[in-house]
């Protein structure tokens, strides 16, 4: 059976999740246009020189908010994956006060493109829209919870939620085909520690023989999902997702406390640095905030999309460790 070759736009395609997504799409033979100004890229465009030389990959180095017919001429895509956004508990802090504008303007740009081109759109939102869920559990049918404190984290969450709401309503009254996904704690090769992501930070500390800095008492609950499983979910959402619907993408089987994650990292790396309990704000500053517990109910994506995450927590930890080891080795050469 031959696969139909599609024209696909991926905003944020050189980021952590986006780069794994474009690897998959390019491997399937599709024509991919990446819109990314590299502000938090995880890969270098030069890594894709071969694809760019053949024209299978086109890179538009620009802010997504300008992705309008008046500013850019690119072939009308069959599909658009929208990933470009500020991200990460620490990564969002430097965009305080500008996050709403960035998320709203870029998402309206892709909505306009999708409407003009009759493209199918997958918008990548976030589990942060749940606040802390119900004692940490987050399902699509549950209320989204807006905390009393106005934090940078809240600005990120409400901007994503505002665009989810606009998208869902637009699908009711306009010929827009749009599906929303909410990833939970994605992890895997190429994720940097700089955005405040806990797993690469722990591995980096372990590889340096330093203590793993656990925030608070380490009893915060999360469920980590391998980036390869998230890519499966994005592709399935594009293929089978119902327009105007939202799907959680998080692996409930990988529930862990942060302290147990630290122990898994110590076991994987053989680190002798131990664990040190600290306040997250002492590392990232007074604007830093995070949910206490947050983990997914993913039954809807499993039932309606046929999504089945397969990578367990130990594989995730091992994959991130091996990737960071090979980066270190290649830098040393
Ligand atoms: N990483 C996670 O655990 C996680 C969890 C939930 C949701 N998400 C969502 O997934 C998406 C991708 O996250 P990621 O971890 O791959 O982030 P990332 O920072 O690694 O990738 C984002 C990419 O988008 C680019 N970018 C950002 N804003 C841009 C703009 N306005 N114009 C052009 N390029 C821009 C960056 O240069 C980067 O390459 C985001 O929408 C994020 O909100 C991520």
Image (spheres, grey):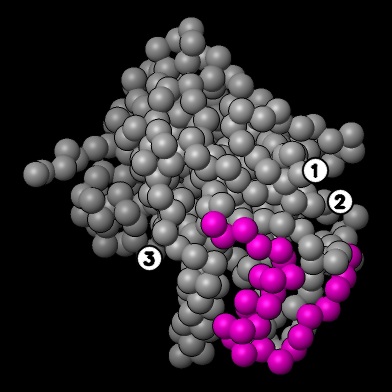
Name the foreground residue: 39 vs 306. Answer: 306
**Vertical comparison of 287 with 141: above or below:** below
Whichever of callouts 2 and 1 sits on the residue coming sooner in the sequence is: 1
Q: Is residue 243 left or right of residue 165?
A: left
Find disc 1 in the rendering and name its residue: 152
Question: What stretch of residues is rendered in magenta?
Answer: 253-279
Whichever of callouts 2 and 3 sits on the residue coming sooner in the sequence is: 3
Q: Confirm whether the magenta stretch covers residue 276.
A: yes
Q: CA distance from mark 2 to mark 1?
A: 7 Å
**Vertical comparison of 306 with 40: above or below:** above
Tag 2: Cα neighbours inside 10 Å, few (<14), some, or many (≥20)?
some
Element type at mark 3: helix
Tag 3: Cα neighbours inside 10 Å, few (<14), some, or many (≥20)?
few
Give me the residue at 34% from left, 61% from top. 48
Residue 25 place in picture, x, y as percent: 30, 49
Find disc 2 in the rendering and name its residue: 287
Q: CA distance from mark 3 to mark 1?
A: 33 Å
Q: Which mark is residue 330?
A: none
Element type at mark 1: helix
Q: Is the residue at mark 3 in contact range of ligand 1, meaning its CB lies under 8 Å from it?
A: no
Residue 200 place in picture, x, y as percent: 62, 70
Q: Confirm whether the magenta stretch covers residue 322.
A: no
Tag 1: Cα neighbours inside 10 Å, few (<14), some, or many (≥20)?
many
Q: Which mark is residue 47?
A: 3
Residue 248 place in picture, x, y as percent: 54, 40
Q: CA distance from mark 2 to mark 3?
A: 35 Å
Element type at mark 2: loop
**Vertical comparison of 154 with 262: above or below:** above
* Mark 2–mark 1 CB contact (< 8 Å): yes
């Amino acid at each position: 059976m031959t696969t139909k070759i599609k024209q696909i736009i991926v905003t944020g395609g050189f980021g952590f999740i986006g780069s794994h997504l474009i690897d998959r799409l390019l491997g399937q033979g599709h024509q991919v246009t990446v819109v990314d100004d590299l502000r938090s890229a995880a890969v270098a465009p030069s890594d894709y020189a071969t694809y760019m030389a053949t024209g299978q990959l086109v890179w538009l180095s620009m802010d997504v908010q300008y992705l309008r017919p008046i500013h850019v001429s690119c072939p009308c895509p069959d599909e658009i994956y929208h990933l470009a956004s500020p991200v990460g508990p620490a990564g969002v802090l430097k965009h305080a006060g500008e996050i709403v504008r960035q998320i709203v303007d870029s998402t309206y740009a892709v909505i306009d493109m999708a409407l003009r081109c009759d493209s199918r759109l997958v918008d990548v939102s976030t589990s942060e829209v749940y606040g802390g869920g119900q004692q940490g559990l987050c399902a699509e049918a549950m209320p989204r919870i807006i905390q009393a404190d106005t934090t940078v984290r809240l600005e990120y969450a409400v901007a994503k939620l505002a665009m989810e709401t606009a998208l869902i309503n637009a699908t009711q009254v306009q010929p827009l085909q749009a599906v929303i996904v909410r990833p939970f704690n994605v992890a895997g090769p190429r994720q940097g520690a700089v955005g405040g992501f806990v797993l690469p930070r722990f591995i980096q500390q372990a590889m340096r023989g330093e203590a793993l800095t656990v925030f608070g008492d380490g009893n915060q609950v999360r469920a980590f999902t391998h980036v390869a499983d998230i890519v499966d979910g994005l592709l399935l959402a594009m293929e089978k997702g119902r327009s105007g619907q939202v799907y959680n993408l998080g692996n409930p089987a990988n529930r862990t406390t942060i302290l147990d994650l630290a122990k898994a990292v110590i076991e994987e790396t053989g680190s002798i640095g131990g664990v040190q309990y600290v306040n997250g704000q002492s590392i990232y500053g007074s604007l830093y905030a995070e949910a206490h517990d947050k983990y997914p109910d993913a039954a809807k994506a499993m039932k309606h999309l046929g999504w089945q995450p397969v990578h367990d927590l130990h594989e995730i930890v091992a994959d991130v460790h091996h990737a960071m080891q090979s980066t270190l080795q290649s830098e040393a050469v």
